[in-house]
Amino acid sequence: MSKLLEGRSALILGIANKWSLAYSIAEAFSRHGAVLSLSYLDERQKQSIEELSRDWNVAAILPCDVTREEQLAALTESLRATGRPLHAVVHSLAFANREDLGRPFVETGRQGFLLAQEVSAYSLVAVARATAPLMTEGGSLTTLTYIGSTRVVPNYNVMGVAKASLEAATRYLASDLGPQKIRVNAISAGPVKTASARAVKDFSSILEWGPKRAPLRHNTEPAEVADAAVFLASDLARGVTGNILFVDSGMQVMGL
Ligand code: IMJ
């Protein structure tokens, strides 16, 4: 297959381990010829990223806690120092307190609500501001979302509200950054057994729906999400911005 991202540089935030959707996306970007910069939250993630990325074309592995303005500013400067324009950014980050995913949404406290919004939604705005100045040849910003933003999914709770905010932010950022030829889109992935999904009560029973009910009759695979991310970052998607692209075996269309 042709290399869709040859000569492009990409920043990928959110690789925690080899189950992360960001990991599959980075692997696909690398296969398509992109030069990667990867960000980590803590030392443990830094180590796993170093090990996981050995076979890729990696320009930099950089610290980035998206709740810290000074780290975002340092990220901008480190990327600037690579001396090449940035073409693509993948934002694959979310966090809510575990207790807020387990009990009724009505019991969500102010701090837990704001934490989920800060890490899972505001961070897209912060990352856009930190990276747009480097996308001097135009570019693409892609985030990951979930159907729990618009429909009630048991236990998703405060994350559903954060994803609704993230999707709205995707549209407003698309409007703001379009004149600079920066496209902003979200991929709404079907359930995948990542580390952050494994932590969810009854996740295995959720995975029984795909093969039985989804139009394509299988569960979403990380490689399917990764291929869609390659498309969105590539010139093939040059007319696509402000979109939520469902990569979910078609599950989203079902009423029952
Ligand atoms: C998460 C909670 C409830 C139901 C869920 C999920 N379903 C899926 C997820 C059905 C697919 C995974 N998902 C889409 C997420 O956005 C997960 C976010 C998340 C997960 C955790 C677990 C560990 C923790 N905090 C978290 N914060 C966000 O401490």
Image: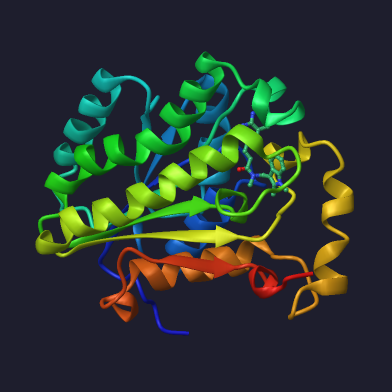
Query: Going 21% across and 53% down the picture, which residue do you hit?
Result: 86
User: Seen from this angle, which residue lies furthest bottom?
Assistant: 1
Q: Is residue 38 visible?
A: yes
Does residue 185 appear to the left or right of 214 in the view shown?
left
Please determine whether, in this image, residue 219 is positioned above or below residue 11. Answer: below
Q: Quadrant of the C terminus?
A: bottom right
Q: Position of residue 224 (x, y in %)?
A: 60, 69
Query: Going 83% across and 36% down the picture, which residue do you hit?
Result: 201
User: Seen from this angle, which residue lies furthest front?
Assistant: 106
- Asked where in the image residue 78 lies, by quadrant, the reply is top left
Query: Going 26% across and 31% down the picture, which residue do you hit?
Result: 75
Query: Colour mode?
Result: rainbow
Q: How many marks?
A: 0
Q: Position of residue 8 (x, y in %)?
A: 27, 63
Does residue 40 appear to the left or right of 255 in the view shown?
left
Q: Position of residue 145 (x, y in %)?
A: 52, 52
Please determine whether, in this image, residue 56 is positioned above or below residue 93. Answer: below
Q: Position of residue 170 (x, y in %)?
A: 34, 53
Q: Is residue 58 visible?
A: no
Q: Quadrant of ligand 1?
A: top right
Task: Give whichever of 49, 231 is nearer the camera.
Answer: 231
